Image (cartoon, rainbow, N blue to C red):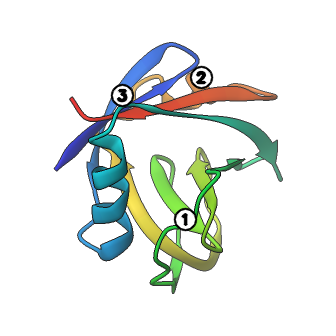
Amino acid sequence: MQITVTVNGVPFVATLADNTAASKLAEILSGGPLTVGLSDYAGFEKVGDLGFSLPVENERITTAPGDIVLYQDDQIVCFYGENTWSYTRLARVDDLAGWEEALGSGAVELTLALP
């Protein structure tokens, strides 16, 4: 299943992971778009509070640019760099053209929606 991921007004298409957390996120998005403020962390990711919890299925992974993951049970993380940690995969951006530029530096607004 695909979702639209919009960063500061720039849209991207992402494919949801095949797990309970991503399914629950899709269920939430069926009620309308979700907007989250993200702040920069460590120069390779943007992190924001979802305002609710999702099911956790953590595994130790090495992320890549375009990965969208769940940290703990209520933080969404969008990667423009790499990191190895224990996360639950949520989605992956299909085409990274402009992804890093859209995330830019500093705080951004992320909107997730069903197409």
Q: Are marks 2 and 1 in contact (CB under 8 Å)?
A: no
Which label number is shown at residue 101? 2
Q: Measuring from the top left, give residue 50's x and y in whole percent.
A: 61, 51
| Crowd rating for badge 2 (residues with CA inside 10 Å; few <14, some 14–19, many 20+) | few
Q: Measuring from the top left, give residue 8's x and y in whole percent.
A: 58, 17
For the point 37% across and 55% down, the residue is 25
- Image quarter of residue 5: top left
Nearest to the eye among marks 2 and 1: give it.
Answer: 1
Q: Measuring from the top left, give residue 68's x and y in whole percent.
A: 48, 53
Secondary structure under the numbered disc 1 in the rendered image: strand
| Crowd rating for badge 3 (residues with CA inside 10 Å; few <14, some 14–19, many 20+) | many
Of the two numbered discs 2 and 3 on the same chain, state the one appearing first in sequence. Answer: 3
- Image quarter of residue 46: top right
Amino acid type, label 2: Glu
Relative to 12, is 61 on the left or the right? right
Camera-nearest residue between 29 and 22: 29
Nearest to the eye among marks 2 and 3: give it.
Answer: 3
Location of residue 93 with respect to 53 vertically, above or below: above
Secondary structure under the numbered disc 2 in the rendered image: helix
Looking at the rendering, in which quadrant would you find the C terminus?
A: top left
Camera-nearest residue between 50 and 105: 50
Q: Residue at label 1?
A: 70
Report the residue that reaches farthest toward the top. Answer: 9
Location of residue 59 with respect to 90 vertically, above or below: below
Of the two numbered discs 2 and 1 on the same chain, state the one appearing first in sequence. Answer: 1
Of the two numbered discs 3 and 1 on the same chain, state the one appearing first in sequence. Answer: 3
Q: CA distance from mark 3 to mark 1?
A: 19 Å
For the point 78% across and 29% down, the residue is 107
Q: Residue at label 3?
A: 12
Relative to 75, is 95 on the left or the right? left
Q: CA distance from mark 2 to mark 3?
A: 12 Å
